[in-house]
Amino acid sequence: MQSGKSYHYYRVFAAACVGMLLFGIVMLSLGSTLPEITRKYQLDDVSAGSLASLLPTGILVGSLIFGPIVDRFSYKYLLVLCSVIIAIGMGGIASASGLFFLQLSFFLIGFGGGAINGGTNALVADISHDHQKTGSANLSLLGVFFGVGALSMPSVMAMLSKWYPYDQILLGIGAVIMIPALFFFTINYPEPKQKQSVSIVKSASLFKDQSLLILAFVLFFQSAFEGIFNNWTTTYLQRIRGFSESEALTVLSIYVIGLTATRLLLAGLLRTISEKLVLYLSICSLILGVCGLMIFHDIIAVYFVAAVLGIGTAAVFPTILGFVGELYQKLRGTAFSVVFFIAVFGNILVNFLVGLLSEKMGISRYPSILLGVVIMILVVFTIYDRSSRKGSRH
């Protein structure tokens, strides 16, 4: 089916899904390789921590720059170049001669992943509106592939590590990533939104747009929630609840499975149900899940809580990005850049604050922090909901 827009809808959507799968791999690359890297290079906690900070820093920078690029030049070269950068980063981790090249490699992986994450979301929003399809539903389906990538990285590492050292596995993954890069190069994409150079002043003005900032801060807190849940849950469950490492990791796996399965379901539901209703139900699920984490101590109950939290997490990013895509069609890529930059910054900042609080007060306060973040998601989205209703009346 060839659209009237000079690109093939399903091929472009497939390219976006492959790109999101790569981002899922990127997000799990550090956790999957850090123990082996620490042993090989005999890194202390400070050096290992520098790698943990450079990956999200790269994602932050990539999230900021992709929007003006796709608005001006469309998506092909961004996807191709960032795939190559990720592959180089994987190869760099495998063959680094010292800490500096490890740090550079993790930054490159984060940079390429952050740009691909934002670019693929903006791309799906573009083609959804071109074809009168529901952006939130398609963005939810896109998010499924993040889960596939996130689950595949540790699984592949665990399976292949029986026969190969981690550096050879990473070199192989880097080589395989070049296949999507070739695929990205062979297809056509939507025309750029801005045929002329994108005005820096016009782009920067989006950081002052009230509606966009409110939506961005919903994702600021949502990204913070996802980050601290992924990074601190296992520590809390082992230190405070006394769970084994395998039980704590199973909780994380159930959370990701719940998120991924729900996004697959939402790809259909969001075509028929109000996005705002789905979002409110999702936030309620998050509140119930966090309260369950506070109350229940049995491992089976905590497994159930993890599934509820995954279900609640699933809709927030796709629906908010759907709203952004609808409101800012002429500078959609740049608007997505603003939103993702603020969201990733929220992840980094709140994770840092949780680290400080856990050092000063102990990790036992972790569920209360989670609850506070979820309440902020509800408060900020309610502000947006009320302001949008007032605007629609005028």
Image (cartoon, grey):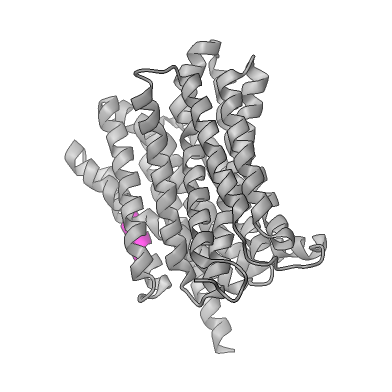
**Front-lying residue, 351 or 357:** 351
Instruction: Relative to 389, say whether 95 is above or below.
Output: above
Instruction: Relative to 174, say whether 74 is above or below.
Output: below
Q: Is residue 345 visible?
A: no
**Percent position (x, y) of residue 291?**
29, 50
**Percent position (x, y) of residue 36?**
46, 18
Q: Quadrant of residue 315?
A: bottom left
**Percent position (x, y) of residue 312?**
35, 56
Instruction: Relative to 54, say whether 93 is above or below.
Output: above
In the rendered image, the residue lying farthest to the bottom is 394
**Percent position (x, y) of residue 283?**
38, 60
Q: Is residue 162 visible?
A: yes
Task: Tell me which residue sits at (36%, 17%) in the image.
Answer: 163
- Count every numbered label the image shows and give the total: 0
Left or right: residue 234 compared with residue 52 = left
Q: Bounds of the magenta span?
A: 281-286
Secondary structure predominantly adopted by residues drawn in magenta: helix
Left or right: residue 151 compared with residue 346 = left
Task: Tell me which residue sits at (70%, 61%) in the image.
Answer: 207
Q: Is 173 included in the stretch rendered in magenta?
A: no
**Front-lying residue, 323 or 165:** 165
